[in-house]
Amino acid sequence: MDKSLQELADILGGRCSGDPETRIGGLGTLDSAVEGKITFLANRKYASLVATTKASAVVLTAADNSYGRNAIIVDNPYLAFARLLTLFTTQPRKSRGVMAGAHLGEGVMIGAEVSIYPGVVVGNGVRLGDRVTLHPNVTLYEGVVLGDDVTLHAGVSVREGCRIGNRVTIHNGTVIGSDGFGYAPDGRSWYKIPQIGIVTIQDDVEIGANAAIDRAALEMTIIGRGTKIDNLVQVAHNCIIGEDCIVVAQAGIAGSAKLGRNVTLGGQVAIVGHVTIGDEAMISGQSGVMGSVAPGAVLSGTPAIPHQARLRAAAVFPHLPEMRKSMNRMEQRLVKVEGELVAARPGAAA
Amino acid sequence: MDKSLQELADILGGRCSGDPETRIGGLGTLDSAVEGKITFLANRKYASLVATTKASAVVLTAADNSYGRNAIIVDNPYLAFARLLTLFTTQPRKSRGVMAGAHLGEGVMIGAEVSIYPGVVVGNGVRLGDRVTLHPNVTLYEGVVLGDDVTLHAGVSVREGCRIGNRVTIHNGTVIGSDGFGYAPDGRSWYKIPQIGIVTIQDDVEIGANAAIDRAALEMTIIGRGTKIDNLVQVAHNCIIGEDCIVVAQAGIAGSAKLGRNVTLGGQVAIVGHVTIGDEAMISGQSGVMGSVAPGAVLSGTPAIPHQARLRAAAVFPHLPEMRKSMNRMEQRLVKVEGELVAARPGAAA
Amino acid sequence: MDKSLQELADILGGRCSGDPETRIGGLGTLDSAVEGKITFLANRKYASLVATTKASAVVLTAADNSYGRNAIIVDNPYLAFARLLTLFTTQPRKSRGVMAGAHLGEGVMIGAEVSIYPGVVVGNGVRLGDRVTLHPNVTLYEGVVLGDDVTLHAGVSVREGCRIGNRVTIHNGTVIGSDGFGYAPDGRSWYKIPQIGIVTIQDDVEIGANAAIDRAALEMTIIGRGTKIDNLVQVAHNCIIGEDCIVVAQAGIAGSAKLGRNVTLGGQVAIVGHVTIGDEAMISGQSGVMGSVAPGAVLSGTPAIPHQARLRAAAVFPHLPEMRKSMNRMEQRLVKVEGELVAARPGAAA
């Protein structure tokens, strides 16, 4: 593919600066792009490279357009570059149909233009929307429902009755709908609480590799529209994750926790069960959240406290041993001072 | 299914209060149950809902039976409810046999009433008990032995020679018997220590999704009877996990660690290698255990200390910056006091 | 197999002590070995067992050879024992070829003596070296390249275009080349940044079970020669891991982080994105590294600080409540002392 700078500016809703007829055939970084490619400046740290890049054009803001290079002027160069990347790299979809070596159960309903690879096993009564892609060795249990434009990568399992919306992508090895971890002590050992709920994944969700989203005990675990979940994340039974959340790798959310909209959980964060995390809260990596969190709060540490307070306390932490010694010395000095004062009192033995 | 309140009371070993002929056809929460359903009161926080629930009967304790509702009186309403849930939701098992698209090696012995789905690959010399269910794309390597009533969900791998007892359930994607992580420096790089032991999983164990239990270097990694392991847990080589333990999601247990009976590890806990965790110890979420733990200890934090002491210290932690400032101010005041005392000594220059 | 002590000494480059004709048919621990077996002493804690072990010979250092037992004298008994273990337990490789139930795409090139099990799905244009073993239900996407002597265990996925060197072993369920976690806010929700790079795994790497190595956004994520990665580890997009690193279970490395040579990350460690970890740095378990790390540094804690300083501070941490109380008492005593001094000043009202 090859487009003029003006055509790309029009696609991005940006403004062309320099020669609008410049031909662009691909993308690269400021460092690595060659002639015929377009690059971008999102971080001013790299501004000096704009003058020297071999790229034929640069995506940047009006404020940064001071290099006399062919350019597309936009408000958000990073987003614009991502859109160009999509434009230049998206392959035309090719439907492969149901391939030999795939196994379909009874009463399966399949939409148009699907691709179902060898080793896929689809249970009875499953319904698949249009343009669904099931990569090799995906397993859908009985009664699963997938919307349109769903892509499940190799090795994904979706357990009985779970529902997945439109434009959802799930990466390899992830498990949707495994049993929640629920047992009651019965005086002898652990009695398993049947987990008869489901998982509902709303539209435009993406989930990384080898994650696990447990089915609800009775009703449903919900992953809200637009939420993005990274690799190796654990979502326990009955959780309700709001819309447009970001959950970074290896985070874990315990049972019945509720996240609002636009919540961000850093990597390896732990959220205890039965709490509510308010809209737009941000929890920094490795933090442990032990209670409910107000909307917009920015927390870190275990137990999590406001992020700035935690940074200040963590900066003092390495000084604890010297603080303790210093306190002990002060105590001794204080004892001495007190002794001298007693000795100096009128009437004291001199 | 539909049963009278008296029949259900008999099944639970409880006592019927109100109309024993009340027909019950299912279950629900205090909030969501409708007529014809039974609900339960396990947490007194919700006691006020007993008067208003639309359910036709309530499972509760004698102490809480003050609402004049149809009820079953038991000692442990949560456990009783779980038993009813099992009763009302358990489907009759249907053996599917060995389905087309499953691959069996040589010398495989198979019990009665098994279900082996498409995409399952069973290695040479494997032995399967009665009523074993192998969901799609399960892989059993050579020489694996499974007891009766074992269910392995889609994508589970059991490596060469590992042994699994009776009534064991393993959820999707979990790996039993991957090589332990053992290397010796050889002066140039890392020399792999062959991992020639196995994993033994005893009766009544349940393991969640995408967990990993490594085979022993020489002998066996053991998961004790009745132990329940959650999603994404790591059990390293040579670990011996006792009976009836609870290991919550994303916990990791390093090599050769030994857990007693009824140990509880919270989510994301780390246990270092070669330590012993005593019976009934409880380690709270995200804690890091650096040494052996006495029976019954309740620890938290990294490094883990007694839980109450840790809560008290963690409450002081955010105040470290002000403590440090306060100490510095006190030091200055002390210097001043000491100076005044010196100046006030008899014979000092006035 | 059965060899003389002298033959084994020659293989190990060690020296024989005692009867060189002693026949050795296997290995065991000091505790468990029986007649005809050889054992080893690597940890002096167990030295007393050398006198009493039932083994027919012991591998030990010259300094420890004071028991009059048949022995092989070497510098590194642990490494020597590992080599004997390899010698006694390695099975002759048997090529199984491409088995029924494996699915090969178009234009696949396959080396000599491969074993491709049922349920394996190999995409178009994949190239496999000699002696490659693909266990059941492995999926290779289009354009994947594997070197010689590569073993991929059941359920492994390698995504489009990723490259794996020679003598690489990857355990069950691990995912190579899932999309990096990259989104840009577009004012409405999250816009996905296409992840068009690959993963390159160099020679002699071993990766545990259920790990996830993400493909780069534009170029490549690299796992360096000889590096060993444990179970459930997360390596994010664009990471460059150096040679001979050790990454213990459940550690997570965020995007664009760079590890030098011989870096060790303990279990559950988190490394933030865009930092550099110097050669031979060691990060202890559960630590959180927030910035770049100098070569050879030994860090622990979150945020990570020098390990010894952290141990000292952690030892004081449980005393924080008493420190705070003690400070408050000292403050009161200081106020009293200051008052007495003021009262004692010449001219003060008495």
Image (tube, coloured by chain):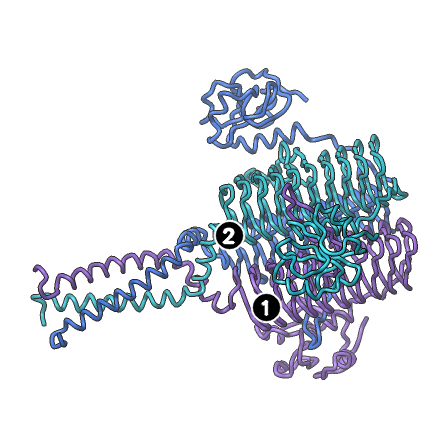
Chain colours: A purple, B cyan, C blue
Q: Picture coordinates of residue A235 (x, y %)?
A: 68, 58
Tell me the residue that label 1 is attached to: A282
Q: Position of residue B184 (x, y in %)?
A: 57, 38
Tag 1: amino acid:
Met
Between C200 and B123, which is closer to the camera in this rendering? B123
Q: Which residue is mark 2?
A: B300
Report whether A91 appears left or right of A342. Answer: right
Q: Camera-side residue: B102 or A184?
A: A184
Residue A173: percent from left, percent from top: 74, 53
Q: Quadrant of the C terminus of chain C?
A: bottom left
Q: Pinpoint the chain carrying mark 1.
A: A
Crowd band around label 1 with a 10 angstrom C-alpha radius: few (<14), some (14–19), many (20+): many
Indicate which disc residue C337 carries. none
SS class, disc 1: strand
Label 2: element kind = strand
* Residue C203 pos. (x, y %): 67, 46
Q: How many marks?
A: 2
To which quarter of the image does residue B331 belong?
Answer: bottom left
Residue C293 to residue C28: above or below: below
Give the amino acid type for the residue marked by disc 2 in the picture: Ser
Towards the viewer: C304 or A279 = A279
Numbered disc 2: what chain? B
Q: Is residue B86 above or below residue B275?
A: below
Can the viewer see residue C145 in this picture? Answer: no
Which of the two residues, B103 or B38, is positioned nearer the viewer here? B38
Contact flag, marks 2 and 1 (Cβ < 8 Å): no
In the rendered view, does B128 fall on the left or right side of B75? right
